[in-house]
Amino acid sequence: MNDSPSLTEQLKLYSGGDQQIAEQVLRAVLPKLHEIAVRELRRERQSAPVSPTELINEVWLRNLRKGGWMINDREHFFAIAAIAMRRVLVDFARSRIAQRRGQGQASFSLEEGAMEAPGKGQVEAGDPESVLQIGILMERLEKVDPAGARIVDMHYFAGFTLEEITQITGLTFRQVRHRWEKGRDWLKKHLSS
């Protein structure tokens, strides 16, 4: 009989502050983190000149290593990791734009229309400015509709199906679908304006 804790139990111990289990957790989640990183980097081809391993290391060092947040289960952990990866990629995009402009900070205003997305309001994957624009819009969406932003993060960025999000969040499928459509429509509206 195997007495070792399941991954969900390990994640709960880790999120409770047990730093001794961190290495064990990292080894267990690494293959799935790599899969998520590959998907995120494929979406942002040119904006982040890093490998999946470098992205995972950055996410782990910045966000996940500390623990201290409540994790319901493994799917919830991977949703948190995917959101953290998106934020790291947005930071990379900000940095590249700032370097290009020779300043410490990118100057950008959605209201002024200073950054038009290429072709009919569509965002071009891999363009650092588009990644930054989506990142800024996601931050704004989090302020106006936190639940919708979480669903968009989980579905679009983390790649979870609406059914999986239903299980992770405890919401009904109808609630998840409604929040996804509302968040998606908000982003489309603000991307095209």
Image (cartoon, grey):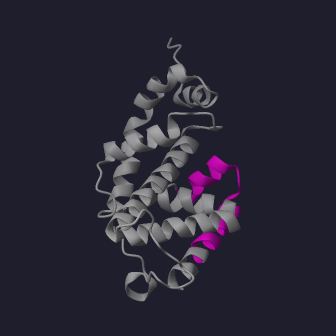
Task: Find residue 127 and report its horizontal and vertical position in percent.
Answer: 35, 70
Q: Viewer-proximal residue, 25 or 162?
A: 25
Residue 1 placed where, x, y %? 51, 11
Q: Is residue 89 above or below residue 79?
A: below
| Residue 118 is a magenta residue | no
At 47% across and 56% down in the image, what residue appears? 86
- Identity of the residue furthest to the front in this view: 103
Looking at the rendering, the stretch of residues picked out in magenta corresponds to: 161-185
How far across and down, in percent of the image, does residue 170 sit?
Answer: 70, 49
In screen coordinates, is 141 left or right of 193? right
Magenta segment's dominant SS is helix
> Residue 119's quadrant in the figure?
bottom left
Residue 174 visible from this viewpoint: no
Q: Could you tell me which residue is drawn at 45 percent across and 65 percent down?
A: 105
Total labels drawn: 0
Q: Nearer the viewer, residue 154 or 176?
A: 154
Residue 177 position by quadrant: bottom right
In the image, farthest residue toward the bottom: 120
Expressed as whole percent of the image width and height from the top left, the position of residue 12 reads 61, 30
Locate the C terminus by quadrant: bottom right
Say if residue 62 shows up in the picture: yes
Q: Residue at x 30, y 62 (%)?
A: 45
Residue 190, image quadrant: bottom right
Q: Residue at x 32, y 68 (%)?
A: 100
Which residue ends up furthest to the top in the rendered image? 1
Judging depth in this view, the residue of 65 and 101 nearest the camera is: 101
Determine whether 32 is above or below 125 in the image.
Answer: above
| Magenta-drawn stretch contains 170 | yes
For residue 15, above or below residue 152: above
Tell me: residue 42, above or below residue 60: below
